Amino acid sequence: MKQFPLFLMLLLAMTATLGAQTASKPYAKAIAKHRKEYRKDFLTNERSPLKNKEDLKALRFYEPDERYRVEATVEVLEGEEPFDMATYAGTTKPYIRYARLKFELLGQQLELTLYRNLQLVKMPQYRDHLFLPFMDATNGEATYGGGRYMDFKITDIAAGKMTIDFNKAYNPWCAFSDGYQCPIPPFDNHLGVAIEAGELQFGKEKKHQ
């Protein structure tokens, strides 16, 4: 058997290493900072399902991957009627469809819908808040079975575009404990692809009340 040339072996090793690097150092650092703040919020929010640092150790995430940071075309929807979005607690919350997002992710054309909570918009601090719940092919295995969420502001939209960074996708509080009214992602936001970015399944047993 002919021996594989050493320089080709080194070249293949370098290529494999580069292929595994899916986030630049500055980007990975920014995501690490974002996740540090995310953890801290659990300890400062009095309604939080996670009350101590031991719980926070069970929070798990995919490694930062810039391929899941995409630019979307935004189509603001007109004449939409309010509707009741179901929650996992068996209740509903009033929402309205705000915009349709179209983007390409790993070579596939995808769409999601942005929503506004009609109760939150009455509060000054949430007046421009936009909500993006979604489900994908990782749910129930690598990630929480009930889907994940992302938050935006109307000001994130500029010239009909906005950035979606799935590395910031997070679990609803229902992933950690019973007793919360977490919206169920509408069917429009069920993606048939695996979003291998953002928060993973909680590393401890869910709390039951």
Image: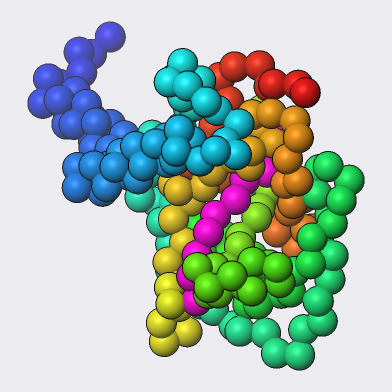
Exactly how many numbered labels are in the figure?
0
Farthest residue toward the left? 7
Query: Which percent across, then down, holds residue 140?
Result: 71, 31
The residue shown at (70%, 90%) is 78
| Near-viewer residue (106 or 99) | 99
The residue shown at (55%, 54%) is 150
User: Is 11 on the left or on the right of 77, as rendered?
Assistant: left
The residue shown at (12%, 20%) is 6
Query: Which percent across, then down, holds residue 72?
Result: 49, 71
Residue 179 quadrant = top right
Above/below status of 115 relative to 16: below
Above/below status of 80 relative to 184: below
Residue 70 quadrant = bottom left
The residue shown at (60%, 31%) is 49
Q: Is 147 colored magenta in this rendering? A: yes
Magenta span:
143-154
User: Is 197 on the left or on the right of 13, as rendered?
Assistant: right
